[in-house]
Image (tube, rainbow, N blue to C red):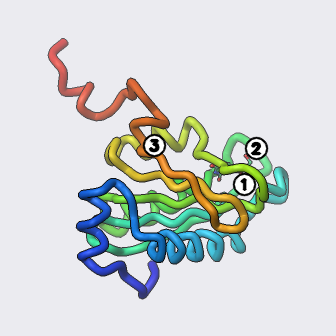
């Protein structure tokens, strides 16, 4: 976890407006890009880092971790989520994904979208280019008509 937490007024603004202040996105991208340096991706050579902002302002990071079995690879987003959840966090405001791709905003894979929707559809997903410029969408826009924990509570 980062020692630098995000101030509560910025978190309140994010909840109200559905976006984070530019300096917060910049900080989160910096953390994601730093985590990307630890990417273990000898097979794809596609480095990914993610930073995850909790609703109380903590930042967790992750990178993709590949495996000789190929199918055992874990994406950067899921690494960050698992780190945060296993430290007791379950409410999140935003995730920022960083790659080395220069001319496209890389968005989370379908598996990660499903994994993340478990913890809330309102999550802000910041997709970035290598230079830190970004595109942002809510998870519910990236994964419409999703299946989630609430469905398991429906009468059957
Ligand atoms: O949003 C993404 C997309 C891909 N990957 C990883 C999985 C694999 O290690 C490599 C190539 O797909 O990139 C991520 O970590 N996050």
Up-down relation of residue 23 to residue 78 (above or below) = below
Kindly identify the residue that appears in the image at 63 percent across and 58 percent down: 128
Q: Which mark is residue 70?
A: 2
Kindly identify the residue that appears in the image at 35 percent across and 78 percent down: 6
Q: Is mark 3 within 8 Å of ligand 1?
A: no
Rounded to the nearest whole Å, what is the CA distance between mark 2 and mark 1?
A: 7 Å
Residue 40, horizontal then vertical, whole percent: 74, 64
Viewer-proximal residue among 65 and 52? 52
The quarter of the displayed image where residue 154 is located: top left
Residues packed near mark 3 inside 10 Å, few (<14), some (14 to 19) or many (20 plus): some
How many discs mark residues in the rendered view? 3
Residue 86, horizontal then vertical, whole percent: 38, 63
**Secondary structure of residue under mark 3:** helix
Please tell me which of labels 3 and 2 falls first in the chain.
Answer: 2
| Label 1 vs label 3, nearer the camera | 3
Kindly identify the residue that appears in the image at 15 percent across and 16 percent down: 155
Up-down relation of residue 153 to residue 42 (above or below) = above
Task: Please say if the residues under marks 2 and 1 sit with CB atoms less than 8 Å apart.
Answer: yes
Residue 55, horizontal then vertical, whole percent: 28, 65
- Residue under label 3, please give it: 115
Say left or right for 25 vs 47: left
Residues packed near mark 1 inside 10 Å, few (<14), some (14 to 19) or many (20 plus): some
Say left or right for 72 vs 57: right
Q: Is mark 1 within 8 Å of ligand 1?
A: yes
Say left or right for 68 vs 49: right
**Secondary structure of residue under mark 1:** loop
Q: Which mark is residue 66?
A: 1
Say left or right for 12 vs 23: left
Up-down relation of residue 98 to residue 115 (above or below) = below
The quarter of the displayed image where residue 138 is located: top left
């Amino acid at each position: 976890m980062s020692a630098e937490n995000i101030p509560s007024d910025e978190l309140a603004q994010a909840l109200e407006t559905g976006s984070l202040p530019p300096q917060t996105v910049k900080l989160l991208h910096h953390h994601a890009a730093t985590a990307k340096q630890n990417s273990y991706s000898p097979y794809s050579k596609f480095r990914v880092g993610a930073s995850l902002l909790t609703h109380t302002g903590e930042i967790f990071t992750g990178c993709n971790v590949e495996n000789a079995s190929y199918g055992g690879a874990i994406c950067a987003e899921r690494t960050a989520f698992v780190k945060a959840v296993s430290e007791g966090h379950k409410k999140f405001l935003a995730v920022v994904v960083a790659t080395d791709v220069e001319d496209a905003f890389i968005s989370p894979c379908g598996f990660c979208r499903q994994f993340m929707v478990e913890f809330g559809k309102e999550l802000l997903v910041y997709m970035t280019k290598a230079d830190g410029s970004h595109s942002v969408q809510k998870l519910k826009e990236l994964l419409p008509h999703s299946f989630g924990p609430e469905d398991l509570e429906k009468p059957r």
